[in-house]
Image (tube, rainbow, N blue to C red):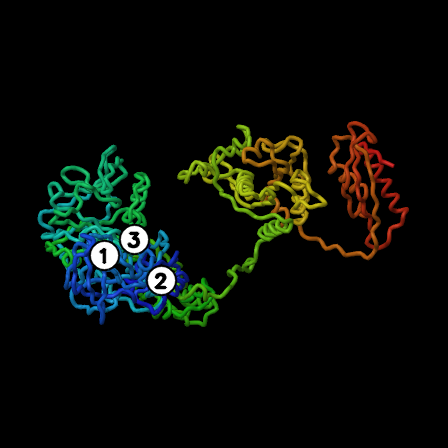
Amino acid sequence: MRAPLEWLHEYCRPDLSAPQLAERLDMTGTKVERIERHGVGAAEAFVVGRVVSAERHPDADRLSVCRVDVGGQEASIVCGAPNVAAGQTVAVARPGAVMPDRTELRAAKLRGVLSEGMILAEDELGIGTDHSGIIVLDDGPAPGTPLDEVLPIATEILELEITPNRPDCLGVYGVAREVHAATGAPLAAPPWAQDPGTPGEVPGVEVVVETDLCPRFTARRFEEVRIGPSPIWLKARLTAAGQRPINNVVDITNYVMLLTGQPLHAFDMDRVAGGRLVVRQAREGEQVETLDGEVRTLDPEVVVIEDADGPTSIAGVMGGARSEVSESTTRVLMEAATWVGPNIQRTSLRLGLRSEASARFEKQLQPEQAMEAQAVAAALMVQLAGARLVEGTIDVGQPAPEPEVLPLRESRVGSLLGKRIPGDRSEEILHSLGFLVAVDPDAASPGSVAADAELAAGLPSGAGVDLSVTVPHWRRGDVEREVDLIEEVARIDGVDRLPATLPARPDRGGLLTAQQRARRHAEDALTAQGLYEVQGWSFQGPSVADRLRLPDEDPRRRAVRVRNPLSEEQSVLRTTLLGSLLDAAAHNVARDRPDLWLFETGGVYLDAPGQPLPDERRHVGALLTGALAAPSWRAPAPPRADFFAAKGVLAALLDALRVPWSVRAEREPFLHPGRSATVLLDGEPAGWLGEVHPLVASAWDLDGAAGFELDLDRVTGLAAARASAYRDLTSFPPVRQDLAVVVPDEVTAARVEEVVRAAGGELLRGARVFDVYRGEQVGEGRVSLALALEFQAPDRTLTDEEVAKLRDAIATALADGVGGELRG
């Protein structure tokens, strides 16, 4: 929505600059995307002039040399307009003027004659599209008068992002109402306050509505219409708002739509066959030619307006070419109707036809707005087109719903916002937004429900005020509950002024749950390892399952389909984080960032047949690609991401959460054979770990990658359930020894560590593998593992004899448990 300030100020003029007003609107919930300047710059260089003489250029048949009085002096201006003549009052740009395209005008010689400025046409001022001749102003302004006092040659425009629940702000007056509430500046009466029309039947016109998709249809008939150009002020406002001026009648419909938010359509009454309009749903395969010259094929969900010769308009979207207003039009039937919003949206999407009208109708306009637009349009038709309004107004449809009346308790406002806002302030705010407000003096009497609520909110007994609030029609469907009224009060009073308070939760006092704390701890642990968090789409394409080489029976192929996907590549919900992590890696690698440490936490979704919702789980995944460190002169080829690097990150994560874990060699279709494992949490499978299969990596144009993915709900559940145990620090020194054991090749290092820890007992504080050797010295099919052992007692210094006994016990356990032999 483009709101020109020059137009907006007609109804509400705050004493604020455009940036200040934009900031205030932003803080009250009306988002300003940008501020744009429309029209000329350096307005002081544009003045009113009077043509003293106009003579043919000596060296050019189509140019005139004019002497122009620009206020106290005459300027020589060469003009190419065919309609320039002596005695005219004109718009003049002097040297130094900045034109709408931001070029600066300078004095120059044209065919040997000095031109000290320019006599301007509409398009040269940015207030219209006409370039056929110069603007000829009405007599009155004296030469030298600043042009911006006569014509709207420059204005700043607020580009607003209007949310779907606020169609009232798709009109300039609706925005002015918001400005009034946000700034306190006076608000002018609505432009539809005076209606020149009358109720009753309209002779010669019949309208029949045959569908419930049209809650209201209104029409007025105008005779003696004179089609012509619109006045400059109207052209200027339309141009600034992004509309192209066409002729006065069409411009009136666009102007009224931009002012009130209600679209209209003007029918050439002489082209309405039979003088009868029928509103109905289209027949299968029916066609209509719209104003853009395209022939549209319709279906029964599309609503059309037809005359005796067939469909003439697509209701709520675009009028038809057959009954459009033309230069020969003398009689106009002005229509303003209400349509069911969701149906208009479906029609617009199905036909691939979007218009300013459909953008408003799809947000569900209210029946009352139709007559508001008719009132404004009728006045303008009489004023600008010289039309005669025929008595009567066609008004077909159901009566408008009764206005909703909602309570607003001061105690409830305070309890929800964490700040007491007096009832009179709430009343002032709601009144400024157009709500009708009445005070109930008995609402907070002692012992009443309101009084009890006040005490619960910490308010003095009897201090609260209850209001009875009537919702205006333009907020119907948006404000439906007391909490909606509280939101209105909060945003206008200032959300930035609300105190920072925790939610009132008697169970936990607003604190995080144990699982929420564990989830944050997990993210912190990964960040501490140098990983960057990414957020991928929850949607993916069906081809991801094929690129991950998932077999047909894999449950991760049971993806939930999206009913209205944006594209085929976002048509199903993801069943694993790996696809989005690979997407993020490929995006970075394609931009010359091959060395990546990424992680993501997010939802995955598996189809649950027979259930209303899919099985949704929260996962955490990590992906490493490229080199693990930057190359240097000491390590020109640093190690690359592999299984063990990913396992190290996994260990840092799970150890930080104190979750017991282990890995078991197992295959995954998307992982490298022999370099993949299942992650066990408390002995139960909870995810995978490994290097990405080369074929999968190449499908994403990667040289290789390694990572893991875990069920984060399982991880945080175990972390939350395990209480942290305090262990006293001891001042007695540890005894550190190394041990090398030879075991069969199929024995895992994790199994060796498990046997060593069990045999070492409580005095063995640490055991880790720090070296692996295969070769002739240990024999084929066997491997040597070197372990660093640390022994420590909490109450004494261990003797060599005690450590030797523990070491012997470990050696015996290794021999019995895994067939291990100590190396000398």
Q: In front here: 99 or 536?
A: 99
Q: Residue at x 88, y 47 (%)?
A: 802
Please say if 641 is above or below 58: above
Label 1: which residue?
Answer: 121
Instruction: Give amino acid for label 2.
Output: Pro
Q: Which numbered marker is on residue 407?
A: 2
Q: Quadrant of the C terminus?
A: top right
As helix, strand or loop, the secondary structure at mark 1 comes to: loop
Q: In front here: 293 or 708?
A: 293
Cα separation between marks 1 and 3 = 19 Å
Task: Measuring from the top left, give residue 57's x and y in whole percent.
Answer: 19, 56
Q: In front here: 328 or 766?
A: 328
Quarter-wise, where is residue 381 in the image? bottom left
The mark lying in front, picked from 1 and 3, is: 1
Quarter-wise, where is residue 819 in the image? top right
- Side of 307 relative to 125 (left or right): left
Task: Measuring from the top left, give residue 233's x and y in whole percent.
Answer: 22, 60
Instruction: Give amino acid for label 1.
Output: Ala
Whichever of labels 1 and 3 marks the residue nearer the N terminus, that label is 1
Label 3: which residue?
Answer: 242
